[in-house]
Amino acid sequence: MSQQVKGVVADGKGAPVRVETIVVPDPGPGEAVVKVKACGVCHTDLHYREGGITDEFPFLLGHEAAGVVESVGAGVTEVTEGDFVILNWRAVCGGCRACRRGRPWYCFNTCNAAQKMALTDGTELTPALGIGAFAEKTLVAAGQCTKVDPDASPAAAGLLGCGVMAGLGAALNTGSVTRGDSVAVIGCGGVGGAAVMGARLAGADKIIAVDINDHKLETAERLGATHTVNSRQSDAVAAIRELTGGFGADVVIDAVGLPETYRQAFYARDLAGTVVLVGVPTPEMKLELPLLDVFSRGGTLKSSWYGDCLPSRDFPMLIDLYRQGRLDLDAFVTESIALDEVEQAFERMHHGDVLRSVVIL
Ligand SMILES: NC(=O)c1ccc[n+]([C@@H]2O[C@H](COP(=O)([O-])OP(=O)(O)OC[C@H]3O[C@@H](n4cnc5c(N)ncnc54)[C@H](O)[C@@H]3O)[C@@H](O)[C@H]2O)c1
Ligand SMILES: [Zn+2]
Ligand SMILES: [Zn+2]
């Protein structure tokens, strides 16, 4: 058995996305069908549409979502019909070498649904990050559903499903930002803005937001930045050094993912400091750095997949902080849109007008 719903499909490199009828199979063993309530538009969806991630078109886009479990397949115990859940793209396997060593946030064998969603002509769809939630309903592995407090607004909760979690975790988990640290964040969209918020949550002393768009810098100040730098108007490295006694920041987070921004992060960091790359580069990008500088500046160069989060640990905890008024997830929701407005949301993302557009279903 299966059912038909509406979903947003990208069927060719750079081609505008379209709302299509999607066939969603009933959940098999270990799977769940989720009624999507809200799904944020992440820059990674645009990377998918532009063929920057894989070329397995057509994609069913959307991966930053919250919803309600409609039905579960055989053997599913972690969630049940009616649970309010955030969808995650790190359903840990429990058996890979990372999981077995007690580091499940690095799981190398994460689970997705075994069955495929498809177009009505039978063409199989590749769900973005194994989720595909710009759709009225989606089929996922049950482990991709993390149950959280149903009082949370779906639009805000869903953001923890990708970008906001990635940014918070880049600061808190990967960068290990702590009290008194100086932190610079390059690129202050949904991900970078959340990194700013994570740095504040951790007690960072100086939080320098860098972007090429003044609107984003204003928002970053609301999210906790103590200083802002427009890197179109001034040199980011010089500005960050000047704001940190001439030395550079303890932790610099690149939430753009270009060779240019990575180089800025590398040189805007104090000796023995940490660079965290959370922005996603495209396959053709290359980085050139003097190897002697990599050596002599010391410290740590890290990449952050999904903020090194463990959904079962981090989502309920962050939703609690949100409900206590200590984590303003609502601040990321710039606008609510309908399923057929995702293409326009990509446009606005290009122009830098929004932190997050969220599809409400
Ligand atoms: N690592 C992960 O797990 C993970 C998760 C989600 C998203 N991402 C990636 O993070 C990146 C940011 O995603 P987002 O959703 O926040 O995107 P976004 O489009 O909302 O924000 C990007 C920001 O970067 C700014 N920017 C662009 N070029 C810049 C430059 N040269 N210097 C300074 N600022 C610049 C833009 O003005 C914008 O404010 C993307 O590459 C996305 O794919 C990574
Ligand atoms: Zn694993
Ligand atoms: Zn994302």
Image: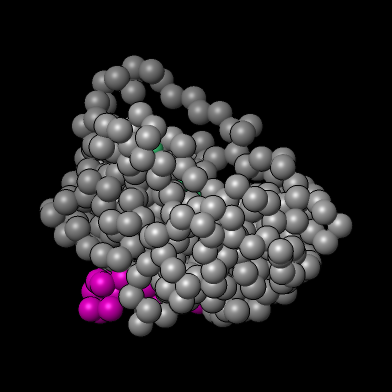
Q: Which residues are magenta?
A: 319-334
**Residue 211 seen:** no
- Residue shown at the point (18%, 46%) measured from the top left: 245
- Residue shown at the point (38%, 18%) measured from the top left: 291
Residue 196 position by quadrant: bottom left
- Residue shown at the point (26%, 52%) measured from the top left: 172
**Residue 323 seen:** yes
| Numbered-mark total | 0
For this view, does 157 lie left or right of residue 21?
A: left
Decide whether residue 309 is among the magenta residues. no
**Considering depth in this image, is 41 or 64 the residue closer to the camera?**
64
Q: Measured from the top left, where is residue 189 in percent x and y? A: 47, 61
- Residue shown at the point (41%, 20%) measured from the top left: 290
For this view, does 5 lie left or right of residue 226?
A: right
- Residue at the far right in the pictured view: 121
For this view, does 63 lie left or right of residue 314?
A: right
Q: Measured from the top left, where is residue 67 in percent x and y? A: 50, 72
Q: Is residue 31 above or below residue 8?
A: above
Decide whether residue 330 is among the magenta residues. yes
Q: Measured from the top left, where is residue 292 in percent x and y? A: 34, 17
For this view, does 315 lie left or right of residue 272?
A: right
**Considering depth in this image, is 226 or 310 the residue closer to the camera?**
310
